[in-house]
Image (spheres, rainbow, N blue to C red):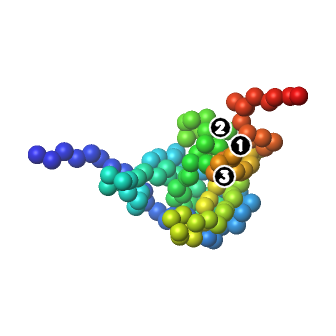
Amino acid sequence: MANYQKTSQVSGAWVKVSELKSRIKATILSETNPQPSQWLNKDGSPKTQDVAKVRFEGSPEIVNVSLNRATINGLVDSFGEDSAKWQNKTLTVETEKMRVAGKAVIALYLIPEGYERIDDENGYAVIVKKGGFNDDIPIIEN
């Protein structure tokens, strides 16, 4: 006998990141939920992506957005771990052309007010409070 688990499928249109302009505003309109992605882990199981419904300034359409780790960490830092609390906040869009596995892609970052995207010491994008890293790093004065 086979056992099945209920899955929820994401319906609706997906964001076209190439059509977005940096510095426009966006609003998350749903909780963020992990969904299976088209990519696979090394063991063949599907990787997950964190998907939310988002409305972008200048567009009446609500679209699906896969939130990257930098965006999620910035939202957690700003609004807390419960993705329900990320809803209806004004976020700033930043896009960045980059290469992933040799393919040209455009990364999308949703940045809370009072935060900015910077590169950490290893060159990875992180979203932090403006004026520095986070509160956990001590400031050493001479």
Q: Answer yes or no: do the residues labelled 1 and 2 have beta carbons within 8 Å?
A: yes
Q: Nearer the viewer, residue 37 or 113?
A: 37
Q: Residue at x 40, y 61 (%)?
A: 38
Outermost residue to the front? 142
Mark 3, residue position: 123
- Crowd rating for badge 3 (residues with CA inside 10 Å; few <14, some 14–19, many 20+): few
Instruction: Identify the mark nearer the N-term, 1 or 3.
Output: 3
**Label 1, label 2: how many angstroms apart (C-alpha)?**
8 Å
Q: Residue at x 74, y 60 (%)?
A: 23
Outermost residue to the left? 1
Mark 1, residue position: 128
- At numbered mark 1, what does the secondary structure look like: helix, strand or loop? strand
- At numbered mark 3, what does the secondary structure look like: helix, strand or loop? loop
Instruction: Identify the mark nearer the N-term, 1 or 2.
Output: 2
Which disc number belongs to residue 11?
A: none
The reply, left or right, for residue 123 in relation to residue 8 is right
Check the image and report above or below for 32 versus 62.
above
- At numbered mark 2, what does the secondary structure look like: helix, strand or loop? helix
Q: Position of residue 58 (x, y in %)?
A: 69, 66
Judged by depth in the image, the label closer to the viewer, 1 or 2, is 1
What amino acid is at disc 1?
A: Val
Mark 2, residue position: 77
**Label 1, label 3: how many angstroms apart (C-alpha)?**
14 Å
What amino acid is at disc 2?
A: Asp
Q: Residue at x 71, y 36 (%)?
A: 134
Instruction: Identify the mark nearer the N-term, 3 or 2.
Output: 2
Check the image and report above or below for 132 versus 18.
above
**Label 3, label 2: how many angstroms apart (C-alpha)?**
20 Å
